[in-house]
Amino acid sequence: MSKDLHPRRPVYAPRGVVATTQPLAASAGLAVLRRGGNAVDAAIATAVALTVLQPGSNDIGSDLFALVWDGERLHGLNASGRSPALLTRDLVVERDPAARATAALGGAQAVAAQVMPARGWLPVTVPGAPAGWHDLHERFGSLPFADLFDDAIAYAERGYGVSPTVAHHWDRAVEAVHAGLSGEEFAEWGRVFTLGGRAPRAGERFSNPDAARTLRAIAATGGATFYRGELAERMVAHAERTGGLLREADLAEHASLWVEPLSVRYRGHDVWELPPNGQGIVALQALGILDGFGAGGAADLHRQIEAVKLGFADAHAYVGDPSPAVQWPPLLTEDYLAKRREMIGEDAAEHPPGDPARGGTVYLCTADADGRMVSLIQSNYMGFGSHVVVPGTGFSLQNRGAGFVLAEGHPNEVGPRRRPFHTIIPGFLTRDGAPVGPFGVMGGHMQPQGHVQVVRSTVDDLLDPQASLDRPRWYWHTGLDVRLEPGLAGAADDLRRRGHRVRIVDEQGAFGYGQAIWRTPSGYVAGSEPRADGAALGY
């Protein structure tokens, strides 16, 4: 944890709780619980409010993933969208100079280069969040769908004071990203998301009346207008006018996926993640590897880092579109995890993928008085996504297509109607078939690393959610490079002796933002990220 932060206290709540990165959004979810809504209703209200209150990290044009404990079992929702039917590898290479320059590398070099463009229309995929809100509500909701939008619409229409961490990242997006973008496709972004060309400052009032109208339309139609109505028509018209690839069929054919969550055993607990196209497999594989080592000891932090590196090596080699045409190998079998565990020695290493037998983000969690719990993550990817805003809609489209690679034949190769590799992952913890609770840490490739650290703090060290989130974190960046928060500086020398290239970093947002809720005999205990503006609110 950054040296200037003070640990927060956990929140104990007998009936229900909401935890997320923005206090006003947590308040919106708590208001739904107080009105008699359940944890799913509260999660939707919180998620919708976050699109208004934290638009750099997520927006109406986002994707989402969720794990829902219905009181008896766990359900998984993959609400990520596919690429447009017109998107091909050849088109990307033709249009983007950087892609042309690196496409010839092929193989692992092309994967490592990450040569997909990050902004503009090329990385835009169909947003899945509006459909995800509807699908969650249709299956589990109790209050009327439209009622869950009230607070978000009010904040968009009447304005709100921008919170400090949001203002910091907003300013960076304006100065470091949008200032370098030109072209008609980017023109609307500046009108909607700047105040005279600059980002709003902390505490400054910001409103987005176009987003309020969009949310009203989604609320009134159950999201249908976004995919087969007026909003869909406006998105397609703007795409056709400014060089985008999105078309009516891309939106009309979108559908979420209900999926079976994956799990791995870790010291008597089961850790749950969603299956690919997300990177939850990294956290599961790392924890499965670490389960074979004892807890603590001089090599403990080194082993955590190496286990995560092994997980990423496999994920980047094998994870892609979760369609029947793209099969990913079983990476969580005991035999395979044992083989990967054997690769961890006393020194740092750069690990290749294994050979198994074939076969900008916001996070929130909620819980209610009847034992239902939700772990939900929602993102437009890099800050403000593609920076493409359809005039009159008030939201930016995500740039999740930047997660594709150009390597031909790779499971995550860019192509038409495909879901890209996703960084956003919700987590859930159970023991002996009973729920412990939802948790998550947002922040690009920090996410599975944050999951590993929160689970270990909880299971190995018996810390409450807030204490787990308060702990200083480490982040494996690439190769042998490891970043430590100042609170872990004492471990730097040992890691360097083992061959890690260590850097002490005290940078806002570098180690992700997390939330967690654990069930207790008397209700719930919750924690919220001390590095950000978030809050855990209960009743």
Image: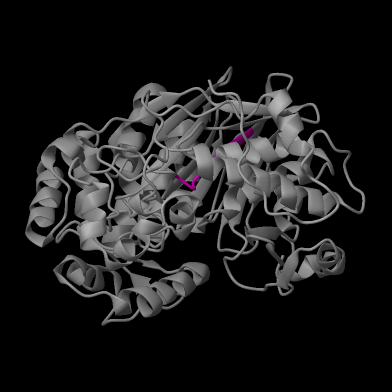
Nearer-the-camera pick, 413 or 257 = 413
Nearer-the-camera pick, 509 or 42 = 509
Q: Please identify the quadrant where the C terminus is shown.
A: top right
| Count of numbered tags | 0
Tell me, yes or no, whether the highlighted magenta stretch contains residue 178: no
**Residue at left offset 35%, top offset 36%:** 133
For the question of whether residue 522 can be seen, the reply is no
Tell me, yes or no, whether the highlighted magenta stretch contains residue 427: yes
**Residue at left offset 80%, top offset 54%:** 302
Tell me if 255 is positioned left or right of 521 in this view.
left
Please give the range of residues in magenta. 422-428
Q: Please identify the quadrant where the N terminus is shown.
A: bottom right
**Residue at left offset 27%, top offset 67%:** 97
Predominant SS of the magenta segment: loop
Residue 240 sits in which quadrant? bottom left
**Residue at left offset 24%, top offset 73%:** 190
Q: Which colour scheme is used?
A: one colour
Give x and y (percent) for residue 476.
66, 58
Q: In this view, does 348 lie above or below 458?
A: below
For the question of whether residue 175 can be seen, the reply is yes
Give x and y (percent) for residue 330.
58, 26
Give x and y (percent) for residue 37.
45, 32
Nearer-the-camera pick, 444 or 539 = 444
Give x and y (percent) for residue 127.
29, 45
